């Protein structure tokens, strides 16, 4: 049975991952409105990936007998000042997620929830990759600025992203 504090934090993280999925779909819609379909596709794929993160946590809590609660999701930001602003919003969210995963890991370690800390290793590694990817793309969007050619080049490259694979349990 999961420690109550750890279960509460895991539930909050499930909801945070679901919010991230909505946020990234909202960013995809923004890029689609600019006819930057490669970036829209990239964020749609990442939205699916975030939903898979929520599913991974959900399944872990279920195996541990934890009570899973899905809360109300706030509406994500839908308007952005520029492509760089959209990328910055996503990057800042990923930094928030990293801090939350660290907090859960600390609580689990303190509660001697070693199964939870072992499971969270995957999320810790994933967040290093996520922050790096979002940081790099944010910097590319900053460098592109309002230059249509550079935005189209970035859009073409990001549009080549393969769909997100399902997470193995």
Image (cartoon, rainbow, N blue to C red):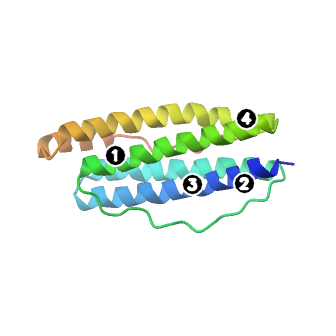
> Quick one: label 3 or label 2, which is nearer the N terminus?
2
Residue designated by label 2: 8
Q: Disc 2 and disc 4: Cα gap in Å?
A: 15 Å
Determine whether 24 is above or below 74 in the image: above
Position of 21 with respect to 104 (left or right) is left
Residue designated by label 4: 117
Q: Residue at x 47, y 53 (%)?
A: 47
Q: Disc 4 and disc 3: Cα gap in Å?
A: 19 Å
Position of residue 136 measured from the top left corner of the image (x, y, whole percent): 34, 33
Position of 18 with respect to 119 (left or right) is left
The residue mark sitting in front, 2 or 4, is 2
Q: Residues within 10 Å of mark 4 (few under 14, many from 20)?
A: some
Determine whether 126 is above or below 92 in the image: above
Q: How many marks?
A: 4
> Quick one: label 4 or label 3, which is nearer the N terminus?
3
Quarter holding the C terminus?
A: top right
Position of residue 57 measured from the top left corner of the image (x, y, whole percent): 68, 48
Residue designated by label 3: 16
Are circles 3 and 2 on residues that touch, CB within 8 Å?
A: no
Observer-nearest of 160 and 28: 28
Residue 167 can be seen, yes or no: no
> Quick one: label 4 or label 1, which is nearer the N terminus?
1
Q: Residue at x 50, y 45 (%)?
A: 96
- Residue 13: which disc? none
Observer-nearest of 117 and 149: 117
Residue designated by label 1: 88
The residue mark sitting in front, 3 or 2, is 2
> Quick one: label 2 or label 4, which is nearer the N terminus?
2
């Amino acid at each position: 049975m999961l420690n109550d504090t750890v279960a509460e934090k895991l539930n909050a993280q499930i909801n945070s991952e679901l919010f991230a999925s909505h946020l990234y779909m909202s960013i995809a819609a923004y890029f689609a409105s600019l006819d930057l379909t490669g970036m829209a596709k990239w964020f749609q794929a990442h939205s699916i990936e975030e939903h898979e993160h929520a599913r991974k946590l959900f399944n872990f809590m279920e195996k541990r007998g934890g009570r899973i609660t899905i809360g109300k999701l706030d509406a994500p930001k839908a308007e952005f000042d520029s492509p760089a602003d959209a990328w910055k919003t996503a990057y800042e969210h990923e930094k928030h997620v990293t801090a939350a995963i660290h907090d859960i890991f600390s609580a689990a370690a303190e509660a001697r929830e070693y199964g939870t800390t072992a499971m969270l290793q995957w999320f810790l590694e994933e967040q290093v990759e996520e922050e790096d990817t979002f940081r790099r793309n944010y910097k590319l969007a900053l460098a592109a600025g309002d230059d249509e050619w550079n935005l189209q080049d970035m859009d073409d490259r990001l549009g080549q992203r393969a769909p997100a694979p399902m997470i193995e349990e």
